[in-house]
Amino acid sequence: MFLDANRVRPLFAAVLLWNATLANAAPAAAPILIEADRAELDQNQLQSTYTGNVRITQGTTVFTGERVTVLHDPDGVPRRVDVAGTPARFSQPAEAKTPAIDARAERMRYDAESGQLELNGSAWIRQNRDEVSGERLIYDRVNQRILATGEAGGTDRVRITIQPRTSQDDATP
């Protein structure tokens, strides 16, 4: 890997801005740890790509996959994160007003401006103890909504499992 410190520094700084976008539930002061077999940081294309057993962690929020691509705006702020894997995974524990989320799919796309996480290909998401699966799911983190669709023209339909609520669930944020 060929890294020029002066050209790479803005991309590393941009990755640190995830605390305000991607890892909304993680403390702002929490460091971001990126582990991968290979990293390619391209300042000219405003893109960073990580391949091979990728794990991105900030606080308790985690993305994993085989390939992660981050697209940045000219100021270095992350705008879109694409994760591919077998499967790609996302997890975020419950904090304050946000429920615990676990998700997996063949491909994920997080749009920092809209706060939406799109899951494609054998998509599955668990919010607290409830589960939704389908070919495509869109999780709107800002409005706490999930849109699920099955395979177009296929027999693979959306599946939703809603667990009975208990008094202990009411105590959970």
Image (cartoon, rainbow, N blue to C red):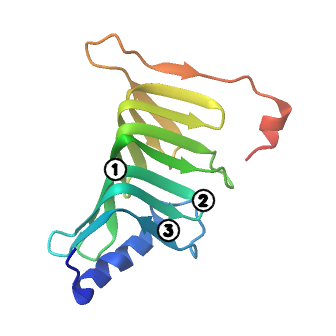
Q: Relative to residue 161, is residue 155 depicted above or below?
A: above
Disc 3 is placed on an element classified as: helix
Disc 1 is placed on an element classified as: strand
Identify the residue position indicated by label 3 in the image.
19
Task: For marks 2 and 3, give the one nearer the viewer.
Answer: 2
Query: Could you tell me if residue 82 is visible in this image?
Result: no
Q: Residue furthest bottom?
A: 6
Task: For marks 1 and 3, give the one nearer the viewer.
Answer: 1
Q: Measured from the top left, where is residue 34 in percent x and y?
A: 43, 66
Task: State if disc 3 and disc 2 touch (CB < 8 Å).
Answer: no
Residue 29 occupies quadrant: bottom right
CA gap between label 1 and label 3 equals 22 Å
Identify the residue position indicated by label 1 in the image.
66
Task: For marks 2 and 1, give the one nearer the viewer.
Answer: 1
Tell me the kind of residue under disc 3.
Answer: Asn
Task: State if disc 1 and disc 2 touch (CB < 8 Å).
Answer: no
Disc 2 is placed on an element classified as: loop
Q: Measured from the top left, where is residue 114 in percent x and y?
A: 38, 52
CA gap between label 2 and label 3 equals 12 Å
Please tell me how crowded label 3 is: few (under 14), some (14-19), or many (20+) other residues with Cα within 10 Å.
Answer: some
Tag count in the figure?
3
CA gap between label 2 and label 1 equals 20 Å
Label at residue 60: 2
Residue drawn at point x = 76 percent, y = 27 percent: 165
**1 or 3: tag closer to the N-terminus:** 3
